Image: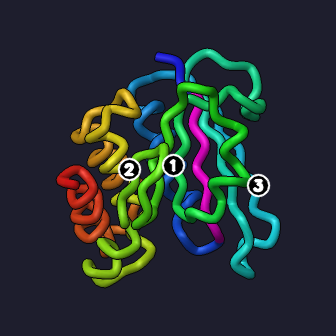
Amino acid sequence: MKQQIIVSGIGGQGVLFLTRVIAQVAVNRQIPVLTSETHGMAQRGGTVLSTIKIGDFSSPLIRTGQADLGLLLWDANLEVHKSLLRDNGTIIMNSSNNGDYISIDAAKIARDLGNAVLLNLVLLGAAIKARAIDFSAAECEVAIEQLAPAKFVQQNLKAFHQGLSC
């Protein structure tokens, strides 16, 4: 398996947790994985970009036109990070608008679950359902259980399952 993924959002949306979950699944499978993140003004609502390379790569950064998948938690970042995706790359975006991407209103689903931050795992569920990442739902559940604080595991799993059912 070889895949390059970008995760884009703003501070407080769970970009880094989503990155860790995806990386943990790869680690659990014993597949090499590299991650990198840029989050300068994230605490003030600024952009957060995370890159994940699953497979045999030597650098964690993704060049323009090389990402296979973009998980966008903030739709305004589409224009900023779209150039990182290859021509036939897949975009799964938290948005109520339709476009040349898979659109899911993950923010609304997360708010309905009582915690807006859960949109990251709703989006992950949608990516697994769309087969945009070659992981099973069960593998993601294990990674969520490994990484989430015990008191948040059930709500994280519920959000992930909501994404799977969209």
Near mark 2 (Cα within 10 A), the count class, few <14, some 14-19 or many ≥20, is many
Residue for badge 3: 38
| In the foreground, 116 or 20 | 116
- Give the mark nearer the N terminus: 1 vs 3: 3
In the image, is 1 to the left or to the right of 32?
A: left
Other-residue count near label 1 (Cα within 10 Å), few / some / many at <14 / 14–19 / ≥20? many
Please provide percent x and percent y for residue 50: 65, 49
Instruction: Report, in whole angstroms, how far the alpha carbon at label 2 lies from the one at label 1.
Output: 8 Å
Q: Are marks 2 and 1 in contact (CB under 8 Å)?
A: yes
Identify residue type, mark 2: Leu
Magenta segment boundaries in residue numbering: 4-10
**CB-based contact (under 8 Å), mark 1 and mark 3:** no
Relative to 98, residue 57 above or below: above
- The stretch drawn in magenta includes residue 59: no
State the mark number for residue 124.
2
Judged left or right of residue 131, residue 79 is right
Q: Residue at x 61, y 27 (%)?
A: 87
Residue at disc 2, secondary structure: helix
Q: CA distance from mark 1 to mark 3?
A: 15 Å
Q: Mark 2 or 1 closer to N-term?
A: 1
